[in-house]
Amino acid sequence: MVDVETQSILVVGGGMTGLTAAIEAAEAGREVYLVEKNPYLGGRVAQLHQYFPKLCPPYCGLEINFRRIKNNSRIHVLTMAEVESVSGQKGAWDARIKIEPRYVNEKCTTCGKCAEVCTMEIDNPFNYGMDKIKAAYLPHEMAFPFRYVVDPALAKSSQGQSVKEACQYGAIELDMQPKTLELKVGAVVWATGWSPYDAKRLDTLGFGAYPNVLTNVMMERLAAGNGPTNGKILRPSDAQAPKTIAFVQCAGSRDENHLPFCSSICCMASMKQATYVRAQYPDAKIYIFFIDIRAMDRLETFYADLKKDQNVTFFKGKVAKIEQDAATQNLVLRVENTATGSLNTINVDMAVLATGMQPNSSISHQPAFASRDDYGFIAAQEVTPGFFAAGCTRTPINVSESVQDGTAAALKAIQSVVRR
Ligand SMILES: Cc1cc2nc3c(=O)[nH]c(=O)nc-3n(C[C@H](O)[C@H](O)[C@H](O)COP(=O)(O)OP(=O)(O)OC[C@H]3O[C@@H](n4cnc5c(N)ncnc54)[C@H](O)[C@@H]3O)c2cc1C
């Protein structure tokens, strides 16, 4: 007889890696608990406009995964949840999970009446704070689970009651409390992914000081149809179409003072984003300032194709400084051409900083025994018997590599609970 507790698997992180690990393990017959701190699954991929290299919308892949979850009663999804502690050994892990209140229960039909009466607004986390949303909100229109969230500030305010009364289904529970869940599982997959490196730390590049300096993750949202400008790429300062855009590679990456490593993804991400700009503005001029272009294997073709575009200039040089023309809010880039040694001044309407992927394992809580490498990644696949790391928690990788790594972790986790 199968012992459900010792054979079940806890997956922490519901991005592409964790989703894959959870689904593969459940479809192979394991009971799986998938713990995600956001109110929805999908991780950073849910916030992308298109995937390289094929430039398809990320929701193609995510939707299939969500359907697989809906069809599998072995997967128990816990959103707004984090692991407070995990201890034990292979076949016998004890995990304590903290679940934050959503203030909205499963009766929610997403009718939106709560948002209609709500006047309180918050920064929209899905769009990296580039716009505001009501404090009673659906995280985004493809969110899974497809259910509203009430911000704690609204739940605790005097307006909370009127928002509750607007819901005719009794879905809003203002007295919802944080919950703690004690789980016993046989194996753990840790897939907590990455965060964009904090561009405010790059003090010479003007992020936060100049409105037309963005980061690459913000550019994804700007191009997305469900983003803050409904998919139109516009300068934040004046909502005008940019005529010249600079992509600043290695913004904080391969730099001892910031992220010493290469995230391996940012070159491809910027080249992909150059295609977003070119699709909307056929006359726009694009500069890509780089140290080296990293486009390995099949991705090399994408690079080769973009190089043929007369409006895209690949400039081998490091952007040392970005300044702003106060009158126009245009940007002035000081760049050293590393091929010739010449110093250049280049004016653009907008700049996108290609910031790297900082492992969440370097900035948030994880078990003390999960040792990290010099860059903050939990690099080992099997951290200790029965505990596995996968995806961008382990190393910076793209989506197809994350899927492979999540699948590998599922297999290892299954083996560890079966072979004991
Ligand atoms: C600008 C940019 C563009 C990109 N574009 C592409 C592209 O076009 N094509 C491509 O193949 N790749 C692209 N990538 C890479 C892609 O984003 C990653 O491969 C992918 O996000 C990795 O998935 P993951 O699940 O490992 O991590 P994540 O997507 O970060 O998912 C991790 C999940 O874990 C959750 N989590 C974190 N901490 C905890 C915790 N303590 N408890 C519970 N849950 C937690 C997070 O909320 C998140 O949902 C891009 C990357 C960047 C920077």
Image (cartoon, rainbow, N blue to C red):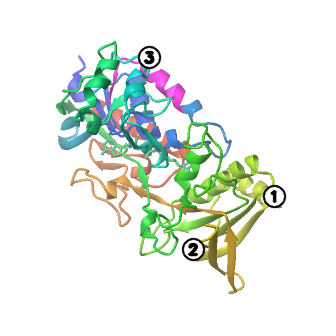
User: Is residue 371 depicted above or below 231 in this figure?
Assistant: below
- Please indicate, yes or no, whether residue 238 appears anywhere in the rendered image: yes
| Residue 24 is inside the magenta segment | no
Residue drawn at point x = 53 percent, y = 67 percent: 251
Image location (x, y in percent) of residue 71: 44, 16
Q: Which mark is residue 71?
A: 3
- Viewer-nearest of discs 2 and 1: 2
Residue shown at the point (39%, 24%) measured from the top left: 147
Residue type marked 1: Asp
Q: Earlier in the sequence, mark 2 or mark 1?
A: 1
Q: Could you tell me which residue is drawn at 37 percent across and 44 percent down? A: 191
Residue type at numbered disc 2: Ile
Dot 3 and dot 2 residues touching (CB under 8 Å) = no
Magenta highlight range: 62-78
The x and y percentages for residue 301 are 74, 53
Q: Is mark 2 within 8 Å of ligand 1?
A: no
Residue at image location 61% in from the left, 60% down from the top: 267
Q: Can the viewer see residue 31 in this picture?
A: no
Does 350 sit left or right of 114 as displayed? right
29, 306: nearer the viewer: 306
Q: Which mark, by number, is residue 362?
A: none
- Indicate whether 53 appears above or below 331: above
> In which quarter of the view is residue 349 placed?
bottom right
Residue 309's label in the rendered image is 1
Mark 3 and mark 2 lie on one chain; the one further toward the N terminus is 3
What x and y, as percent, mark residue 393? Answer: 39, 51
Return the residue nearer the eye: 358 or 331: 331
Amino acid carrying mark 3 in the image: Asn
Q: Is residue 154 left or right of residue 129?
A: left
